[in-house]
Amino acid sequence: MTATTVTKRAATGALTGLALGDALGFPTEFNDVPSILAKFGPWRGMDLPRPAVVTDDTQMTLALGKGLRTAMDRGTLTPKRLERPVREEFVEWYRSPENNRAPGNTCLKACHLLAREDRRWQHASQVGSKGCGANMRVAPVGLVPGLSEEQRAGAAQLQSALTHGHPTALAASDLTAHAVRLLAEGAEPTGLIGLLRSYAYDNRTRYHEFWLGDLWTRAQDPTPEHFIARGWDECLEILGRLQDAVRTVSPETDPCLATGEGWTAEEALATGLLCFLLFVDEPLTALRRAACTAGDSDSIACLTGAFAGAHLGADAWPAEWADRIEYRDDLLSLGTLWDARPAAGARQP
């Protein structure tokens, strides 16, 4: 772990960027680009709303982050140790009066079922849903230090499967957490798509039975390998489209035209990455581009913010924005905790 990795405060940067993108995209979701421009003016001048209210994207990110923190405080991360506190946090979010930000139906249905403690979590999982609710919240898995690659992949897929059990949701969540981790550790953005494609190929037929149990049997696939490969193949296809888009897309056109509107997990990943990669050194411009899209603008922008913050760190975001974001104290609590811990294998100073 380099000094830069420590000092840039990647976890604080990523969580802050995620919430800022969420708040910026909240008022523009469900609007096409001409309508957004008519209401807010030129997209490069979009300002953070007052108050800077977030959606269920940030709320569920915090729920996952708190559950992950509890699990790791209890010892080595395992499926059983992770599932219980995350499940409890998701149910608490579901029952909260603050759960009034147009949450997705898949999350609501699954959390309703998760509230029944006599049910195995696999019975709550919506195996037909690959909505972006699976990976809009997964950034904490990419930020918490000290996990092996197997733990990180398993945790990313398990947290998805608690609500969204479609193999594409699992794979896209795994890829999103992996991308956040790579950027936090200093990977060059120019090589990021290649690294993600290699990771997808390497894991294409790997079903994490230790983490997912018999989830695959709830679908119509003949084997667990066939089940998970369907998800990785869809992600590989969108990563190919993303690679082409980075070279050919004009920053002035709606990114959704190239990589999809982001309602599904793989499209949210790709379009969020596209906005980040178009403006690697201009994080606010990247957020504004992501918020001015025809698709699921808040989820696209929150992913863009997570990638930009992981890459550039906490100083990427001006204080006049970061200091007034909703749930600022909760975001800082997790970010500060994870920024203070050394990565696996790193020596204590």
Image (cartoon, rainbow, N blue to C red):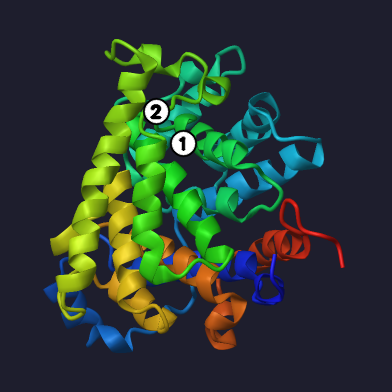
In-image side of 56 versus 141 (left or right): left
> Where, quadrant-wise, is the C terminus in this rendering?
bottom right
Q: Which residue is mark 2?
A: 165
Residue 36's place in the image compared with 22, above or below, is: below
Query: Which quadrant of the figure has residue 276?
Result: bottom left
Query: Which quadrant of the figure has residue 215?
Result: top left
Give the residue type that dot 2 points to: Gly
Residue 55's place in the image compared with 8, above or below, is: above
Q: Which residue is mark 1?
A: 160
From mark 1 to mark 2, how far is it between C-alphas?
A: 7 Å
C-beta proximity under 8 Å, tags 1 and 2: yes
Callout 2: 10 Å neighbours few (<14), some, many (20+)? Answer: many
Query: Which quadrant of the figure has residue 313?
Result: bottom right
Secondary structure under the numbered disc 1 in the rendered image:
helix
From the viewer's side, name the closer residue of 26 and 71: 71
Q: Which residue is pictured at 12% across the width and 75% down the height?
A: 34
Q: Position of residue 171 (x, y in %)?
A: 39, 38
Q: Which residue is pictured at 31% across the width and 70% down the height?
A: 275
Q: Which residue is pictured at 72% across the width and 46% down the height?
A: 69
Q: Position of residue 113 (x, y in %)?
A: 48, 22
From the viewer's side, name the closer residue of 119 and 262: 262
Q: Position of residue 147 (x, y in %)?
A: 67, 44
> Where, quadrant-wise, is the N terminus in this rendering?
bottom right
From the viewer's side, name the closer residue of 23 and 204: 204
Secondary structure under the numbered disc 2 in the rendered image:
loop
Give the residue type that dot 1 points to: Ser
Q: Which mark is residue 104?
A: none
Question: In this orientation, does residue 157 appear?
Answer: yes
Q: Position of residue 152 (x, y in %)?
A: 58, 42
User: Of callouts 1 and 2, which one flags the residue occurring earlier in the amino acid sequence?
Assistant: 1
Determine the residue located farthest toward the right in the rendered image: 349
